[in-house]
Image (spheres, rainbow, N blue to C red):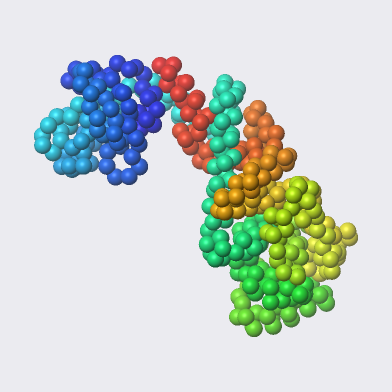
Amino acid sequence: MQYVWQHRLWCSEDMVTNDGRRVRVLDPGLLNTDAGPDFFNAKVEIDGHIWVGNIEIHVRASDWHRHGHDHDKAYDNVILHVVDKDDAPVYRTSGELIPQVVLQVSPRFGESYSQLVNAKVQLPCASQLAAVPRLTITEWIEALAFERLHAKVDRLRELYDLYSGSWEDVCYVTLARTLGFGINSDALERLARRTPLRLLHKHSDSLLQVEALLIGQAGLLQGEVAKAAAGDAYVAQLQREYAFLANKFSLQPMEGEAWKLFRIRPQNFPYRRIALLAHYVLGGFNLMQHIIETETTQQLRELFQVELTGYWASHYTLGKPAPAATRALSASSIDVVLINMVATLFYARGEMTDDYRLCERAIALLESLKPEQNALVATFELAGLKADDALTSQALIQLRRNYCDTRKCLFCKIGHWLLSRAAKRG
């Protein structure tokens, strides 16, 4: 009912109070999300007289009394009580009668809303998308892209504050999370937070020690996989080195169960992702500086075209040699890193330093990259909503996760258009 009132989706402008006075809504007011009346500063004309004040909305008029509004002075400035069922008159604390109207809503609106939120399919409006004006969809997609970017920036702001303004620390934790590619993102971020750069930098001249710290802190030098690699000389070195460093710095490893290995391709095993993280730490982590200094998308790609050396040039996991395992990330995986990490770092750095050239660079980067190929984006493509670039695919991911999956159709511009059309049909 609040939604209908806010967006003026009632059936007819000919409203009449329960005592026969004609009502015309000049301004429905501002929705109040805190305590007090539902809408502030509304303007209505009642029998030719203009009233400015607040609006209260209830399903039943008697809810006014059940909620105690008749004894609450905060509701004395309500100029109109809007209800679905008129089952009682309502009064201010002074005993003065408050004008009351029944909100007339099209049955089609309720039916359309119910069909959307109760649909058993992934995209409840898929069959109706073709009817939505292209301009409405385009504007909404653009808004969603920035909504997703800003949500990511908020996450980086928290890291920036946590690490006292160190962009390299922010980049390190963000890189770790991104290398999880969804399935192990939380675990890799936990590992990075548990193994900070200040500790790693003390040993950044030794790949063995950096890998021992990271793999050991991940809890992967113990458990069944580590036991199976008991005869592997390098694994034994890692275990000895981590035992020494853990004792020296009072370190506690993560639980090995935090990592997901089931149905993951060998090149995506967390051991190799951690080895890639160690590669960037070796010699001192300064990836953020390199990212900011690059000038082209190809140069950005080259930052992640890494071939692992040493043990991980021939292994996917502990104790099991694998041929031709040097390339850390595929070309498509590198683009995912550019989309989810690099573009976000550009935008966050730009916003937080008022360097809006970096914000523009973030958008240009996303527009230059191909859209992500995943199940979420594919669902929209099947419904006729195709992504031409990564900026659009990011918007579609935001739409699916934050609106479609949660059935927030009332807050989606596509859903709003469909519901408005249903309401206006009467």
Rendered position, 345 above or below 86 = below
Q: Which of 376 and 134 is in front in this view?
A: 134
Q: Is residue 316 above or below residue 87?
A: below
Q: Where is residue 7 in the image (x, y as percent from the top left)?
A: 40, 27
Q: Can residue 25 be seen in this view?
A: yes
Residue at 22% across / 34% down in the picture?
Answer: 78
Q: Which residue is drawn at the image coordinates 33% and 17% (left, top)?
A: 13
User: Looking at the image, which is closer to me, 141 or 132?
Assistant: 141
State how many labels appear: 0
Q: In this view, does 263 lie above or below 10?
A: below
- Is 371 drawn above or below residue 23 in the view shown? below
Q: Which residue occupies the extreme left position in the image?
A: 95
Residue extending furthest toward the right: 323
Residue at image coords 82%, 63% = 308
Residue drawn at point x = 17 percent, y = 42 percent: 73
* 320 with respect to 11 (left or right): right
Residue 319 % position (x, y): 81, 69
Q: Position of residue 177 (x, y in %)?
A: 64, 57
The image position of residue 25, as x and y in percent, is: 30, 23
| Quadrant housing the N terminus | top left
- Quadrant the C terminus occupies: top left
Closer to the camera in the image, 184 or 412: 412
Q: In which quarter of the image is residue 77?
A: top left
Residue in front for this viewpoint, 355 or 14: 355
In-image side of 266 versus 90 (left or right): right
Q: From this viewpoint, is residue 264 visible?
A: no
- Where residue 216 sits, quadrant-wise, is bottom right
Based on the displayed image, in which of its 4 quarters is residue 388 positioned? top right
